[in-house]
Image (tube, rainbow, N blue to C red):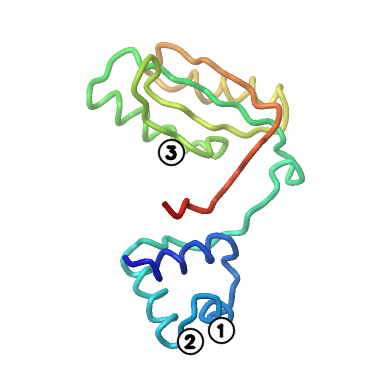
Amino acid sequence: MDAKDRQIIRLLQQDGRLTNQDLSEQVNLSPSPCLRRVRLLEEAGVIQGYAAIVDQRLYGLPVTAFIRVRLERHGRALVQQFEDAIRQLDEVMDCHLLTGDADYLLRVIVADLEAYEIFIRREMHAIPGIASLDTTFAYGVVKSSRTFPTR
């Protein structure tokens, strides 16, 4: 991947609805080579898809919780079972494997605190092998970027 590919990616991250004509003008390429580069980036899996960016509050899910999860054990079967269960939960937007005291960090979105309680009691408590859950609620967003840094 060269600097031109990175420029294309950055522009598409900022606006995935750019036409090939507009994109090619902004990266200073003719339309055919620009489209060819985009297709190659898609085929290589660098560009994995395109999606609408939706305001979670206006959608009706204003509460964001970050949950640190610690497992009782780290055996292959238990870890696989936990990760498979997490992948099935629509409320879990992101799940990151961590170093340190917690094993995972989840970003969960829900409508309100009652919905969060139901999520914990019905979904998280049903997953075997969880030793602890530690939740922090976000009460604002300072920065949310979907555009990779250029460095």
Residue 34, placed above or below residue 112: below
The kind of secondary structure element at disc 3 is helix
**Disc sitting over residue 13 in the figure:** none
Q: Tag 2: residue type?
A: Pro
Residues at badges 1 and 2 in contact (C-beta under 8 Å)? yes
> How far apart are labels 1 and 2 at the CA level?
6 Å
Q: Position of residue 145 (x, y in %)?
A: 57, 47
Where in the figure is residue 71, as x and y percent of width and height? 36, 17
**Coordinates of residue 138 in the picture (x, y in percent):** 65, 27
Q: Which residue is mark 3?
A: 87
What is the CA distance from the residue labelled 3 to the residue labelled 2?
A: 39 Å
Within 10 Å of the Cα at label 3, are there few (<14), some (14-19), or many (20+) other Cα atoms?
few
- Please give the label number shown on residue 31: 2
Q: Nearer the viewer, residue 144 or 108?
A: 144
**Is residue 128 rendered to the left or right of residue 74?**
right
35 on left or right of 54: left
Compared with residue 71, is residue 61 higher up or lower down, i.e. above or below? below
Give the residue number, with chain letter if any, for mark 1: 21
Which numbered disc, 1 or 2, marks the residue that appears first in the sequence? Answer: 1
